[in-house]
Image (tube, rainbow, N blue to C red):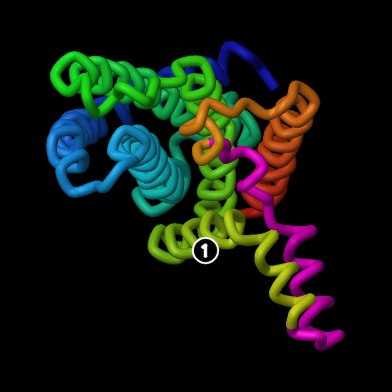
């Protein structure tokens, strides 16, 4: 693979997605979270500050996943449906370079969104601390742990983008979107599937749930949002292994997408 061609594809994908009204998500996030910062403390009992912190992080995760799935499933599929793939393939661009470039381009967009929403998030929390000091008298904003959580959210989103692209190369955009959401939801509850199989005391159900756990990405390993609300940071070994786990899954999914895409005829 040629790095210059991959960079060109990634840059073009980045510009295309940024122009596609993606940044409106930032305005929506800022508006909703500003309302939440003002309203949630009034309706909560004693943990208003922690609810605000958790709500803001949850919104960042949800909006980012929506972009990763809805845009990711159409990155390659849109080229196929519009037949522009017929223009790209004859050029000196391999199908692997196209897949990797598209993935890097959308990953860069998501990274920019996370940074922008993180700035809005911390700014509104700072405003809340200055305007409502009584709410925060027994609470603090764990800046380091929250920033770390956003970093691992980026790895999770890169994995979801790889899932979306892998489905998008051989199914319609609608099916790819549904499958990607299914993987996302099951990935966050994969450990619960194993527990469910154990509780069933049925050998067949246990076999199914155990093998699903082995195949599906365990996204809970990349989700530290619940811990960082209380300022808890996992140990270094857990962080390192989780990062490696996520990146290896991204590479495997990219390899699967390239393998399937390389055998499609146009």
| Dot 1 crowding, Cα within 10 Å, few <14, some 14–19, many 20+ | few
Which image quadrant is residue 174 in?
bottom left
| Circle count | 1
Q: Nearer the viewer, residue 199 or 6?
A: 199
Asked whether 118 or 63 is in front, the reply is: 118
Disc 1 designates what residue?
A: 182
Going 28% across and 39% down the picture, which residue do you hit? 48
Secondary element at tag 1: helix
Figure quadrant of residue 61? top left
Q: Eyeballing the image, is 102 above or below 46?
A: above
User: Splitting the image into 4 quarters, where does residue 250 fall?
Assistant: top right
| Residue at figure coordinates x 68%, y 45% from the top left | 253
Can you say whether 38 is above or below 116 in the image? below
- Image side of residue 5 versus residue 195, left or right: left
Q: Residue 58 appears at what percent x and percent y?
A: 38, 42
**Horizontal and vertical percent position of residue 52:** 30, 36
- Residue at (18, 14) in percent of width and height: 130
Q: Nearer the viewer, residue 55 or 170?
A: 55
Q: Which residues are magenta?
A: 200-224
Residue 89 visible? The answer is no
Percent from the top left, x then y, of residue 51?
A: 33, 41
Between 203 and 19, the residue placed more toward the observer is 203
| Residue 202 lies in the magenta stretch | yes
178 with respect to 217 (left or right) = left
Q: Residue 207: say if magenta.
A: yes
The answer, for residue 16, to whether it is visible in the render is yes
Main secondary structure found in the magenta portion: helix
Q: Position of residue 11 (x, y in %)?
A: 43, 18
Quarter of the image where the N terminus is located: top right
């Amino acid at each position: 693979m040629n790095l210059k061609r991959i960079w060109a594809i990634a840059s073009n994908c980045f510009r295309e997605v940024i122009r596609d009204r993606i940044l409106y998500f930032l305005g929506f996030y800022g508006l909703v979270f500003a309302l939440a910062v003002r309203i949630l403390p009034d309706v909560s009992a004693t943990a208003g500050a922690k609810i605000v912190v958790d709500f803001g992080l949850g919104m960042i995760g949800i909006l980012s996943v929506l972009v990763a799935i809805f845009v990711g499933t159409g990155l390659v599929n849109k080229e196929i449906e519009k037949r522009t793939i017929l223009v790209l393939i004859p050029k000196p661009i391999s199908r692997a370079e196209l897949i990797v470039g598209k993935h890097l381009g959308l990953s860069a967009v998501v990274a920019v969104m996370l940074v922008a929403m993180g700035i809005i998030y911390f700014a509104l929390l700072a405003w809340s601390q200055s305007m409502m000091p009584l709410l925060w008298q027994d609470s603090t904003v764990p800046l380091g742990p929250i920033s770390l959580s956003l970093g691992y959210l980026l790895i999770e989103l890169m994995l979801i983008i790889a899932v979306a692209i892998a489905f998008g190369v051989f199914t319609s955009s609608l099916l790819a979107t549904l499958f990607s959401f299914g993987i996302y939801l099951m990935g966050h509850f994969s450990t619960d599937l194993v527990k469910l199989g154990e509780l069933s005391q049925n050998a067949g159900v246990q076999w199914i749930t155990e093998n699903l756990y082995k195949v599906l990405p365990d996204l809970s390993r990349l989700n530290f949002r619940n811990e960082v609300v209380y300022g808890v940071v996992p140990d270094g070994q857990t962080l390192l292994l989780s990062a490696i786990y996520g990146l290896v899954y991204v590479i495997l999914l990219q390899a699967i997408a390239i393998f399937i895409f390389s055998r499609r005829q146009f």
